[in-house]
Amino acid sequence: MRVVLFGATGMVGQGVLRECLLDPDVSEVLAVGRTATGRRHAKLREIVPADLFDLSSFESEFAGYDACFFCLGVSSVGMSEDNYRRVTYDLTLSVARIMANRNPDMTFIYVSGVGTDSSERGRVMWARVKGRTENALLALPFNAYMFRPGFIQPMHGVRSKTRLYRTLYAVTSPLYPALKRLFPRIVTSSETLGQAMIKVGRVGGPKRVLEPRDINAVRRQ
């Protein structure tokens, strides 16, 4: 399986990249992002565009891939709805349309989040925008899946870029086994998330929108 990975330097993307490089069924990873990963691996190739909104000069590079794992994202804290929509909806759809055009049989997996509002009419801004993004992706002519993780425990050296989140994860790391037992509907790990995405990318998923318990179940199968 040949994979395009967007956002490989974020916390989710780091975990997905690690699992892709370890998985014998993944033959190649093309990482695309704002910054380089700093990784060196025989499977890994990277593109660092000057502007992620303009990938026209790289379109030919995206042909022939089996799956796209879209892990790019930003926190909505302190952002206006217009600015958040530009990064979350506009950027995601601009990439997805290129992928659908180049690889109509591709599986496209979008990392969303628990609480996403599929109605697009709720009071929570980020949830509305994420819901609109999901709905638009599901309407495109390829195999789209929405992953909605809740609490993600980073593993194997995966780190968040956000200082507050790093502090939170440092505090909760010893509690992860207990949290997983107590809250199986919302808790997963970077390892589980990455492995579940690879599996869905390879053979498809049980449903188009996967909540945390679905993600955990896919990985166990």
Image (tube, rainbow, N blue to C red):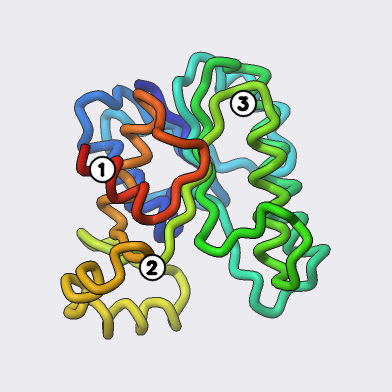
Question: Mark 3 and 1 residues: CB-CB less than 8 Å, in contact?
Answer: no
Per the rendering, the mark at residue 151 is: 2
Q: Residue at x 57, y 51 (%)?
A: 34
The residues bearing labels 2 and 1 have C-alpha atoms spaced at a distance of 16 Å
User: In the image, residue 18 lies at what x, y percent?
Assistant: 28, 46
Q: Badge 1 local density, few (<14 within 10 Å), some, or many (20+)?
A: some
Residue 180 horizontal side relative to residue 162, left or right:
left
Counting residues from the start of the chain, the first of labels 2 and 1 encountered is 2
User: In the image, residue 126 lies at what x, y percent?
Assistant: 67, 66
Circle 3 residue: 99
Per the rendering, the mark at residue 155 is: none
Q: Residue at x 50, y 14 (%)?
A: 64
User: In the image, residue 209 lies at what x, y percent?
Assistant: 51, 43
Quarter of the view holding residue 2: top left
Q: Badge 3 local density, few (<14 within 10 Å), some, or many (20+)?
A: many
Q: Residue at x 29, y 64 (%)?
A: 184
Circle 1 residue: 219
